[in-house]
Image: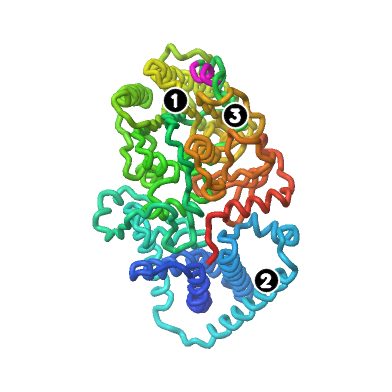
Amino acid sequence: MKWLSQIKDLYRYIITVLILNIPIIFLILLNNMKRVEFSALSWFYFICVTIGYYLLPLFILSTIFCVFLFPLRRIVIVILGATIVIFVYYLLIDSLAYQIAKFHIDLFWLEWIINDYKGLGLPTVTAVSAFLIFLGIIAIEYGIFRAARRIKKIKYLITAFIISIIATYTVSQVIHIFAYQQNDIRITSLTPHLPIYLPITSHKDAVKYGSLFPMNTLEHSTGQVQDESGSFVYPLQKLQFTQQPDKQLPNILIIFLESWRFDAMNEKITPNIYALSQKSLVSLDHFSTGNSTVCGTFGFFYGLHATYWSAVRANSTVIDNPILIDVLKDNQYNFGIYAKSNFVRHKLKDAIFRGITVHESFAGNTKREQDVDLTKQIISFLQRQKNSTHPFMAFAFYKSNHSPYEYPPQDSIFMPAGDMNLVFASDNTDPTLYLNDFRNSTHYVDAMVGDVLRELDSLDYMNNTIIIITTDHSEEFNDNRANYWGHGSNYTEYQIKVPLIFYAPDITPRLLTYPTCHIDIVPTLLQHYFGCTNDISDYSNGVNLLAQSPDERPFVIGSYVNHAFILGDDVYEIYPMYTKKYKLFDIRQKAGRPPINLLKQTLEETSHFYKPQ
């Protein structure tokens, strides 16, 4: 069994190299934590993450190469040596960039830094310094590999290392799951500082056993707040408002139609909403901030790009609520929030409606039946407001037009229609059946929205109520004949462009001819209706929809695990080690090089609310 002994010797040698790299990786990651106030639990968690998460991919690669390439010992050492050099170099360069710009480097930014670092405003000395750092890492790793040869064989080293990797990874993720559930910022606030870190956030037992985790509670501080590490600052300045003693504050009604497409707002599909649109500000060239519910809802209420979601989610106990909700609270608004969209599990309740009742229980066994009860509940809420001297903010989130689409027979106005069954779908699958199914369900929801609007009118609220109707994301039906269905799978317009109806009695109805975004809602409301005198950039990445049309600008859209930059008609879908480039209107067409001015603006906006360390 000589070959087995050779594998074991090579494996032991490589593991020794990995162990010697732990202090280097630890110090690099610690450099990102300059403002973090560590507790004993934070230190323990951070050490476990360093060993169990960041060494895990190197350990897996080492195992694979040692098992399958063990006869080629020198080649294995060279390949793994190069891999470790690149990995450590990435962590170090990312850490240096994070100190300056407060963003982590992925392949998208790395590519454009290499190709056009001067266009990004980086001097030549930066490239020279980066190259010298790379040579330094090579020298350090060469020394580590040589030192590993001189270390005597340690009995049970392989077994102890494998147990340590598995144990530290498991412990770190269990800690994060319970900390996430309990909003313990001793743990969750560390996540945004760690590059390419995707911790597990939920487990079925987290709620059941969450009380066993020692939670660290913080009282909400009003005004300007920042996270415990001092990096995320929101807003940048305390908001100031003009005195408007004689102006009556408007009521606000927000309605989401789940998965609503930008081309599904018309007289036939949504007759009631269409009738309102004729008296409203309308945008059909409107981007959600997500191709999934969480990012789409977050951007709408915060007015921030979706890439800030991780920072807000990690520090929700400090932030408490978005500025818009805080302003409504300060003005004594009554809240009626009706949504069965897992707001608690997704942390939207903690991040957006902390301290506000979110109604998630509706009568019925199906979404169709539950939406009927939701309509009854929100109408009842509107009726109760007649006895109140305070304005109200109501939010209704309809779910019947989420797959599988539900509606009664009388709403089968688009035929033929059929339930979605995509097991055997392909690029050539005709989407008509499924698209009509979606249209019918949207027509059904529109009828319930019509009931709410008529009740609002009968209560004489239309003269002092802002009505915003939109959605969290769109829905794709093989539009590009690339076998994409639903949402959350790409960033073409079929998954991220949605309708926006903005009704207010004091605005002139019109169709906006330039692109808009969910991040524009907050500054529009705060500036135009609440008299906020701050520059919009103090609290939002958006613009005021009622002011002049903006110049060309980037849009930042989020999903479950990644995000994308929309620059003109080009989409750059960002993964840590890969950038997928395609056209907004056709995923089969490759995107070009982005304009340098939009790149700079994207970089500024996505780091704007981070305070340099």
| Residue where numbered disc 3 is placed | 283
Q: Secondary structure at mark 1?
A: helix
| Residue at 34 percent of width and 34 percent of height | 334
Label 3: few (<14), some (14–19) or many (≥20) C-alpha neighbours in 10 Å:
many
Question: Along the line of sight, which residue is nearer the eye, 573 or 56?
Answer: 573
Badge 1 is on which residue? 464
Disc 2 from disc 3: Cα separation: 45 Å
Between discs 3 and 1, the one toward the N terminus:
3
Give me the C-alpha separation between circle 3 and circle 1: 22 Å
Relative height, residue 524 to residue 136 (above, below): above
* Label 3: which secondary element: strand
Q: Measured along the vertical axis of the image, is residue 278 above or below residue 232?
A: above
How far apart are labels 2 and 1 at the CA level?
59 Å
* Residue 77 is one of the magenta-drawn residues: no
Nearest-to-viewer mark from 3 and 1: 1
Q: Position of residue 497 (x, y in %)?
A: 58, 33
Q: Amino acid at mark 2?
A: Ala
* Camera-side residue of 480 and 605: 605
Q: What's the residue at 53%, 18% (across, down)?
A: 274
- Is residue 530 visible from the viewing direction of this image? yes
Residue at 46%, 40% (x, y): give it: 243
Task: Check disc 1 and give the amino acid type.
Answer: Asn
* Residue 380 screen position, x and y as percent: 31, 23
Q: Which residues are magenta?
A: 272-277
Question: Which residue is labeled 2 in the image?
Answer: 130
